[in-house]
Structure formats: structure tokens, C-alpha cells
Amino acid sequence: MVGAVEEFAHPSHQVQRLLKLAASWPEPQASADEPVRHLTHRQLRTARQLRPEEVDRLIEEFRTGASIRELAHTYRVYRTTIGQHLRARGIDTRPFTFLPEDVEDASQLYRDGWTLDQVALKYQVGNETIRARLVANGVTMRPRGRHSRR
């Protein structure tokens, strides 16, 4: 502990120069004609706790169609915080781009000769997602790579 006190009591030459330089910096002045800026990332960085009634309200808003981004702006918290509250209440926040009812159509496209990549591109998901869903649906996978069909 004594070493830390001595270190701060006697700053190094570089620290002394930096402190002297910082003292010469002008104070930032807010101009009346400057536009009002939106909240920045740092301005949102607070340990704001949502009250239970706010969480109930945001969940209801999410269920009626509000996006996570909109909710984060409304409640002045990060999107991840909104997602954590939703998941804590058992709400899946992942977008559903490959629905269970799409599996049969995707299976038929694959049987018709489409590649996993082509099917994945059509449904805008990864090819491993397509592969896993097709296998679960009982589709026999073709060998990987470019093989000629005979």
C-alpha cells in the first residue's frame, strides 16, 4: 500500500508532462446553435434497473409487435437487457426465418437436386441449420462436395 501512495505522490516525468498539458486544454463550450444530439452509447451506460411493472409493460409491448430496438430506446437500456428480460420470462427472441412448416418444402427442394447452400440461401439461414432440419425430417444426405450424379 505504501508503494501505491508513493507512486501517486511522486508521478513520473511523463505523467507530470501529461498533467501539465491537460491543464492547458480549453473547457468544452456548448454552443446555442449546436443541434441536440441523440443519446450516445456512453450516455446509455447506466445501471438502470427496470421495475417489475416496467418489465411487464415491455413484455406486453413486445408481444404486440414492438421491436427490441424500440423497447431499448423507450426504456433507455441496452437491447441485450431487453432480451435478458424477455428470455427470463420464457420468450424466445430469435427471429423465425426457417419455420417448421418450411421443412417439407426444403426437403423436396433438396431431393430435387438443390444443394444445401442453395436451400439455405432461399430461407436465409445457415446450411448446417438446413442440414440438421432435413436429417431430422428423415432426408438422406448426399455426399459432401461436388459429385456427378449418374
Image (spheres, helix red, strand yellow):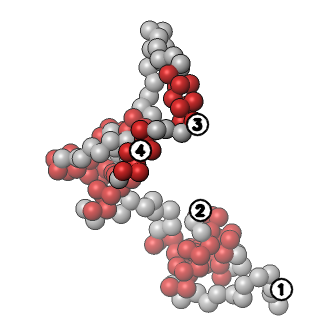
Residues at marks 1 and 4, CA–CA distance in whole angstroms: 76 Å
Which badge, 1 or 4, is on the more N-terminal residue? 4
Which badge, 4 or 2, is on the more N-terminal residue? 4
Q: Quadrant of the C terminus?
A: bottom right
Q: Which amino acid type is marked by label 3?
A: Gln
Which badge, 3 or 2, is on the more N-terminal residue? 3
Which badge, 2 or 1, is on the more N-terminal residue? 2
Q: Which amino acid type is marked by label 1?
A: Ser
Q: Closer to us: mark 1 or mark 4?
A: 4
Seen at 57% across and 30% down, the residue is 17
Residue assigned mark 3: 14
Which numbered marker is on residue 124?
2
- Assess disc 2: are there few (<14), some (14-19) or many (≥20) residues with their C-alpha within 10 Å of its C-alpha: few
| Left or right, 77 with reference to 35 | left
Residue assigned mark 4: 6
- Assess disc 1: are there few (<14), some (14-19) or many (≥20) residues with their C-alpha within 10 Å of its C-alpha: few
Q: Can you give x and y, in whole percent of width and height, for residue 40 in the image?
A: 45, 34
Along the line of sight, the residue nearer the viewer: 94 or 43: 43
| Left or right, 119 with reference to 40 | right
Residue assigned mark 1: 148
In the rendered view, would you say 28 is above or below 33? below
Circles 2 and 1: CB atoms closer than 8 Å: no
Q: Which amino acid type is marked by label 2?
A: Gln
